[in-house]
Image (spheres, coloured by chain):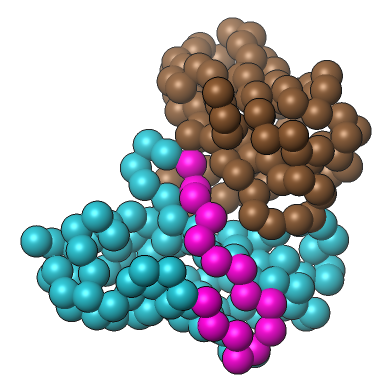
Amino acid sequence: ETGVTQTPRHLVMGMTNKKSLKCEQHLGHNAMYWYKQSAKKPLELMFVYNFKEQTENNSVPSRFSPECPNSSHLFLHLHTLQPEDSALYLCASSDRIGNQPQHFGDGTRLSIL
Amino acid sequence: EDQVTQSPEALRLQEGESSSLNCSYTVSGLRGLFWYRQDPGKGPEFLFTLYSAGEEKEKERLKATLTKKESFLHITAPKPEDSATYLCAVQAENYGQNFVFGPGTRLSVLP
């Protein structure tokens, strides 16, 4: 399997639930990113990891908690989300931090009830 | 305030009708400008990188150009399979290692 894989592809959860999004890359990259894509808004960078170390937290609310156990895996733990958090969450990777191109997964479509 | 804008927001073309998409930016110290294509239900797919004014890149029916304030994505004789949302992203000195994306242009090519 190649590229960037995200699971699940779709997720519906209540505001009090706890869930996790998973991202896995098979490209040998060292940098991984979480983005939020809302309707008619630009992609918003949420978190950046470089060699498993978080280098950027773009003022993201604490109800989003990232985890990067190794350079190939990235998680986004979700708890007590709000309806405005409904969006497409995209994971990306690049060979080194700040390098292009970034390779994106197909995202998790999250809906908060 | 730094920003990246794209126009038009949406564009409908007939097959074979050439046109251009615009990405305008107001940043200091541009490091690079990047074009992506995003199909419905998919993540963005990288198309081009441009680093300096005057640079051009081509791929099939697409050509990207860069000036000091904007980039154009020219689409020559488009086909229905070119229908997608086209995103531009900018990397600048004051963004550190990060990229700022524009809102995208949604292109529809009708047969």
Q: Colour of chain A?
A: brown
Left or right position of A84 against B61? right
> Residue A81: where, in percent of width, then height?
60, 22
Q: Colour of chain B?
A: cyan
Q: Quadrant of residue B16?
A: bottom left
Q: Quadrant of residue A95?
A: top right
In the depicted structure, whether residue B98 falls above or below residue A35: below
Q: Quadrant of residue A32?
A: top right
Q: Is residue B29 magenta?
A: no
Q: Is residue B52 magenta?
A: yes
Q: Nearer the viewer, residue A18 or A82?
A: A18
Left or right position of B90 against B19? right
- The residue shown at (24%, 55%) is B81
Q: Is residue B73 visible?
A: no
> Residue A23: where, in percent of width, then height?
64, 25
In the depicted structure, whether residue A49 falls above or below residue B10: above
> Residue B18: where, in percent of width, then height?
24, 80
Q: Nearer the viewer, residue B90 or B34?
A: B34
- The residue shown at (61%, 68%) is B49
Left or right position of B28 against A101? right
- The residue shown at (60%, 44%) is A103
- The residue range painted magenta reads B43-57
Looking at the image, which residue sits at the far top? A17
Question: Quadrant of the image for the C terminus of chain A?
Answer: top left
